[in-house]
Amino acid sequence: MTTPEATQDGGLYATRQKIYPREIGGRFQRLRVIAVFVLLGIYYVLPWIRWEGRQAVLFDLPARKFHIFALTLWPQDFYFLTWLLVIAALSLFFFTALAGRLFCGYACPQTVWTETFLWMERLAEGSRSQQMKLAKAPWNGEKILRKGAKQFMWITFALWTGFTFVGYFTPITELAGKIASFSTGPWETFWVLFYGGATYVNAGFMREQVCKYMCPYARFQSAMFDRDTLIITYDERRGEPRGARKKGTDHKAKGLGDCVDCTLCVQVCPTGIDIRQGLQYECIACAACIDACDEVMDKVGYPRGLIRYDTQSGLEGKRKRVLRPRTLVYATLLAVLVAGFAVTLSGRNVVGIDVIRDRNALYRERPDGRIENVYNVKILNKDRAAHEFRIAASGLPGVEVDYLGPTVWVAPGAVQSVPVRIRVPRGELQGGADVILSLEAVDAPHLTASGKARFIAPTD
Amino acid sequence: MSLLDDQYTGTVRWPRLRQDVAIVTWPSFLVASVATMICFAFIDPMLVGNDDYPPPAFASRMSGYAIGFFFFWLISALSSLLTLYLARTARPEPPARQDPDEGTRSVQ
């Protein structure tokens, strides 16, 4: 019986134990490194890209506008975001049913940032055994230097991450200037530190414990799994009974399986599980055990794949099915949603109207015998070009509209308030009725919008 | 085999208190993020407050969003905390019962 290997250091709440995953190379680890570079590359570079004189991707919260390249979304377009979230969730279901926890192993921010923090740790403190030796060593000059270097890299990287995060919400070039001159606003400073701090704690200390204890997806993923889902699995029929053996012996004659019980698959596991006990919810599908086992199999001259990506049906020697009702339903739903999203987004109305009754008076009787109501009309021009708008009223007998001028000019991406007077001849109307105000761009007649408001007239 | 140069890692567990802090703060953080997004898609923080007597309740939009987020986080964390408390303090299920027809059934 071996004891769990861990060091004790003063944690926040109680003695905590640290896992030192053993570093490993191999084809799946190369894939993960590529994923880390691509995803973090996108994250750190995207806010610096410019588009038509502004930041290409900017969720401008102070102005309540989201810029995503050519697209500008307003609070009224919120349902697009909801739609997008539904698509994201469905994609997760689809890929989970197809290939298990691909997301966890390759794309989850928790995994990706943990991976980079592990690299920095290795850069400063060396390999797994060197790290464990250093942890046990007394505090001498070298230990201070190595631990200090690690902390310096971690903190710098975490702060840069926080800065980039805030850079998605406030123009990043301005933010950089403010930081350089120590003049950031209180909330900007706070969010840089908050997100940076969260990165530091999550990726530096909590790591895969987040997946084990805090991630809801880890727990409900099994609901999306079936016998044809690709999972990381140990071929028990081939591997058992496991056991050590001398090189060159005929293990089959001795009644042994292919597993040499080197425990490397356990040592490389960042969540500290033994994949040979079967599928466990702690497994984040990082495939480190596959790479480790393949390496051992190569060394001892057995075929690779004792631990591999396979389905339960595959393990039992049955046919693998990629197309099955579950994946077909997910794929169809996903295709419909994405197509609908694209169509709706491209045909989105970029003009809006908001009609608010003037609160000061119900109505006014003019000397010419007409009843007048005053409204505050807000014209939203979400287009990227300026437009001249004409306002028309309908729905009431003999209605006429007056808004000081033949047209209203609205700048691109702006809201223009216009006081609008609506008049109806006295006697045509008793009490109240709805009036419809419609908007049309003079230079682009397809840009229209209309709004309804209450018109109040005397009851006599 | 000389491949084994380090000892078996084994599985480490977080202490109970840390697990509790994590499973209260983290799900409530996720829920609060979604709630903030939905809430402020419909409500402009600068329009919150008494219409007739400006100024509005928040000094700026950014502080409105931030205070709103932390409010949602606090509320949902309270809910998580109560749920956790109820789940943790419930009387444990009775142990596995012997059923002559089906054999031993264990309660998960």
Image (cartoon, grey):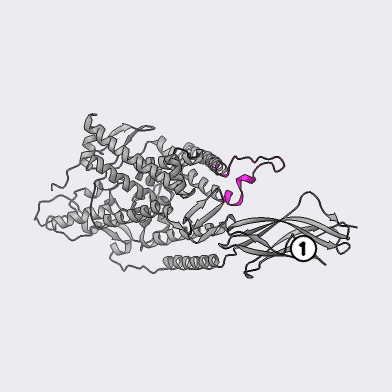
Q: Is residue A140 magenta?
A: no
Secondary structure, mark 1, is: strand
Residue A136, given in percent of the width and then of the height, sits at: 23, 32
* Residue in the picture at 58% in, 54% down: A75
Taken as a whole, is the magenta stretch helix, strand or loop?
loop
* Residue in the picture at 48% in, 36% down: B89
Indicate the chain on which mark 1 is placed: A
Q: Callout 1: 10 Å neighbours few (<14), some, many (20+)?
A: some
Q: What span is colored magenta in the figure?
A: B38-62
Horizontal side of residue A97 vs A344, given as left or right:
left
Residue A318, given in percent of the width and then of the height, sits at: 30, 67
Kindly identify which residue carries mark 1. A401
Residue A160, given in percent of the width and then of the height, sits at: 38, 44
Horizontal side of residue A251 vs A286, given as left or right:
left
Q: Is residue B42 magenta?
A: yes
Horizontal side of residue A427 vs A26, given as left or right:
right
**Residue A137 appears in view:** no
Report the front residue among A21 and A419: A419
Query: Vertical placement of A145 versus A74: above or below?
Result: above
Three-letter residue code for mark 1 = Val
